[in-house]
Every structure is written in structure tokens, then in C-alpha cells.
Amino acid sequence: MGKTRACFEALRTQLPEYRVATPAGGPDLMLAVEVIDRTGTRCAVWLDDLENYLGPEGLEPGLLTELVRLRIPVLATMRHQQFEIFAAPEDPSEAGSEHARLAIAGARVLRQLEAVELDRVWTAGELERAGEVDDDRIADALDRHGPYGLTEYLAAGPALLQEWHRATRPGGHPRAAALIAAAVDLARTGLRPPYPIDLLTDTHEPYLVAAGGPLLRPESLDTALEWATRRRHGVTSLLVPTQDPNAWNVFDYLTDHTRTPIPDTTWHAALQHATEPDDLATLGFHAHHVAPVIAEDFYRQAADVGHTGAMINLAALLARAGHTDEAEQFLRRAAGTGHTDAMNNLGLLLDSVGRTDEAEWFLRLAGGIGNVEAMNNLGVRLARTGRVDEAEVFFRRAADAGHTGAMNCLGVLLHEVGGLAEAEVFLRRAADAGHTGAMYSLGVLLYEVGGLAEAEVFLRRAADAGHTGAMYSLGVLLYEVGGPAEAEVFLRRAADAGPTGAMNLLGVLLYEAGRVAEAEVFLCRAADAGDPDAANSLGILLSRTGRMGEAETAYRRAADAGHSGANNNLGILLGEAGGMDEAEDFFRRAADAGHTDAMRNLAILLRQTGRAYEAEIFVHRANDGEAGA
């Protein structure tokens, strides 16, 4: 609340001599920049509700860089709910879709901006300064705002939200409440206001029926409208008037604080009301994850009239549902218009179904035209197929264009080939830009070179962002530096997400702490999932608790998978049970894999069976192996 007024006051205070450009949408923004540049006018760009300007035809990272170069100030506002949508991590199942690409591009723009967050609740210092202002409204708000933010109280947000919810009760204003609910959900579909009264009237009936219908004895439509549009607290109304006397907007506090599912009837009402392809595509964008079947209807109607973004998003939905042939058709249509994102996505789709040569062709085409995502995706494919030098070229090109994923991939690639110093540079750039994978990769690199304190910092950042590998690696680090209690916390989080290595180490940690039964549970889970390290650890636990038959079974599972430690342990167990010939076989298998303890154990066995000369050979091999290590 108050974001627009705060931005206006900042503009008035800091740039009083500047004219203000307020483009109506993304395409108008690019035109405005051209006009400002051509005329040399001292002008600031005002973008209220920034989400309406993000995208390939609006504010994208390249245009923002150009605005900075031209020294054109940009002021923008964005509700927290919308900020979270664009700042949220990408859904891996949607990687490459227009939906994901738009979200990623928006996130990159947000990272380039100097964000000023208006917290809902003010600090003690802010409240103290507010008390020094000679304004009766602020004084009243300071006395009465309670748990709400001061600006919320001033804008009557909490009070109006409660009044709306109470209106549904018998004896209240149930029809008005239903009209408001319809307007709130229409706004949440992405349908732009104003909303004609006929649309609200047609849409509100299911809400009224769901609340109780005739049993609530709803008021007349005129009475409901009068109540919903009445000004409250000298500030605003629930339904907000617009320039059209027969159409309304809705108080955005209500929209921000509504989380209930949007009924299908409201989505369909929005579909019937939207006429422009861009509006249909926007509705599809909002429905994409919460109502994919309905989103498909929006996208198809927009795609039918040539909207390439809708074609790309529709292809993403179809591919996720397994309809890859139809998804390919829409991507080819969009790619045929020269849309490089469609070329990129088509390349990813073809790669996913094994048509690798054709996939690479489209990725090269899109990357050659300048699509940064395609450069990165091509780098990934080249690295995966062993063409590391060429992969590095494309990763560098994408990284130079600001692609944080490419910075991470390049850092990982350089790390693997031994270029640690340069790898660290790229990983830090990506981590500083908020790339979770880069935080993890940088933490691993720092851990390997002995920078444990800083490694812990980056691994914690990545783990807090939900990166399972970082949870596991942080658990390993904490286990090694003697923080078993906290190590257990992160290993449990990682184990719950599935990595068997985390289950294995957690089992080892619990065993060392004397919690044998609990340790066995995790080791069994990991061993049953096919982890040979865990099967070997389970064998150790079982043998130390006297369950030799079960221990042998566990060791054999790990040994069959080539685990040299398990081969050695199985040799010890069999030798102690008198199975010398089979013990020798397992010792030899472990020794051939370079296991020095197995070499020494084999030497002992050989001496016991009168083969002293051969025993000395394995003793020397063990000594040489330890010296080399």
C-alpha cells in the first residue's frame, strides 16, 4: 500500500525539473525511449505496476541497459505478490517455455533494479518520525493501527477486507460481496480493468450461490452496487470508480490478500470478455500453472490469430501433457515467424525426444541470431556430448550477455578442466546475481581448495534456497569440521529430498552417536535405492552388532557394484569365518582397484598359506600406494 504515492513523492523531490513519460504498455515503452533519446528531453520513465511492462516487447534486460546508458531515470512500482511471481525459481518442467522465459527475463530485470521495499509494518524509527508530522490522520493511525501497517490503516485496507468478508453473512450484503469477489478474481485472472457492470453481474452469481444463495436473502443489484461503491474512511471504496461510469475496478488490497482458487466460471467469463490477442495470452499466463486446461483455451484462441508467445506457451503445456507432436507443430509455426525463443524451445523439445542433430541445428540458429538462452542450451548440449572447447565458447558468449545460468555452467566446466581461478570468477558473478546453482558450485569449489569458512557461507545460501545438493554438501562440511548436530539437520533435509549419499552419511553420523536403530533405517533406505556406499556402511553396522549373515549380504551387494571397500570388508568377514579361498578372491578384487588395506590383508592371508614371496609383492604395492597418496 502507498507504493505509487511514495514513488511519486520521490520523483517530485529528486527530479523536480524532469518531464515524465508514462507509456501505456511494453511496446509504447520502447517508442518512448526512442523519442526521449531523439529529442534530448530531460525525462523520467514512470512504470506503475511494473509487471505490465516486462517481456520481450517491453522492459527486458537489454532495454534497461540502454536506459542506463542514456541516463534516463526509471521509476517503477510493483505489488509484492507480483514481485514474488517473477522472482520465484523457474519450474524445471517448464524450462524453455515462453512462460518460463518471461519469468526469467523479468527476474533479470528485477535484479538490475535498485529495489526499495515498503514493508507492511514500520520500524520503531519510522513510527517515531511519523509522530513528529503535524497531521491528524497520521496521529490517529499511530494510535489505532494495531497489528497492521500504518499505510494499511491509512488506506483502510484491513477494515475493508474484513467488511467484505462479513458482508456474506445473513443480514449483510451478500450480493455486494459476490460482486466484489467477482471483481477480485477477474483481476487475479490477469484481465485488465475496468470491468463493466454487465460482466460483474454475469460473473457474480456463482459466488452468491456458493455462499448460500436465496437463503441469504440477497439485496437488489442497485442496493448491492451502492454498498460496494460507497466510500469508506474518507479513503476508498471496495469497488473503485473509473472514467467509465458503467465500469469498475477493485481495491487492490483485496486482490493482494485473496488466495482462494478462481472458479472456472470466472476464467471463462474473462475469456469471453477478452478480445485482443495480447489479453488472451496474458490470461493464459496467469492460468498456466493453476488452471492449465483453461490456459490452453486462452492460448489456442490467441495462437489462432498468430500470437507467437501464445504458440510457445501452448507448446509448453502440450509437451508437459505428453503431446509432443502437436507441441512441435506450434513451435515450428512460431519459429517460422523468426521468433528465436521458439527456435530455442523447438531445439529443446527435439533434443528431449532424441532428434539430437535437428535439435542442435535449431539451437545454433537461435544462438546465431543472438538468443542468449539458446547459446546456453547449446553449450549444455555440446558439453554433454564431449565437445568441451566449443561448449566453452557458447557459455562465454551467453555469460558475457549476462546469463547467470551460463556463468554457472562455464564455472563448472572450468572447474572440471582445472581452471579454478577463472571458474571462481564466473561462479561468484552468478552467485552474486542470485543463482542458487552457482552458490552451490562455488561452495564446492571453495571447499575443495580449503576455503571452508567461505564455502560454508555459499552452501548455506544455496541450502536456504532449497538446493538439495547444497544441503548434502553442507552436511558433509559440518560433519568434517565437528558440527554433528547441525550436520544432522542438513543431512536430514537432503535425505528427505532423495539423495542416497545424504542418507548414507546421516546413517554413519547416527551410528557414531550411538543411535544404531535409527542409523540402520537410513542405511537400508539408501542401500535399497542402489547406493553401494550405503550397502557397505550397512554391512559395517551389522557386523559390529553381531549380525554376520546380514552383514555378508550387504557387503556382497556393494561388492557386486564394484565397491573396493566392501570387497575388502567381505574378505575380512569370510576369512574370519574360515572361507579363505573366497576371502582371497575378494581381497584381490579390492587390491586390483587400488585398495591398500586390501593389499595388506591379502599379504597376511598369503603368508598364512605359505606364499611369502607373493605376500611381499602386495606389501610393496601397499607401501607404494600410500607413498603416492
Image (cartoon, rainbow, N blue to C red):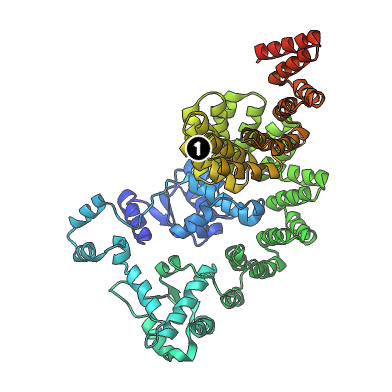
Q: Quadrant of the N terminus?
A: bottom left
x then y, percent, for residue 99 = 62, 57
Q: Vertical placement of 477 versus 366: above or below?
A: above
Q: Quadrant of the C terminus?
A: top right
Q: Vertical placement of 623 versus 230: above or below?
A: above
x then y, percent, for residue 587 = 76, 23
At a point 59% along the width and 28% down the height, the residue shown is: 423
At a point 81% along the width and 44% down the height, the residue shown is: 356
x then y, percent, for residue 257 = 43, 66
Q: Residue 55 versus residue 519: which sits nearer the camera? A: 519
At a point 82% along the width and 24% down the height, the residue shown is: 581
Mark 1 closeness class: few <14, some 14–19, many ≥20 residues within 10 Å = many
The reply to whether residue 56 is visible in this rendering is no
Looking at the picture, which amino acid does disc 1 mark? Ala
Q: Residue 468 versus residue 608: which sits nearer the camera? A: 608
The reply to whether residue 200 is visible in this rendering is yes
At a point 24% along the width and 64% down the height, the residue shown is: 141
Q: Which residue is under mark 1?
A: 487
Q: Residue 535 versus residue 85: which sits nearer the camera? A: 535
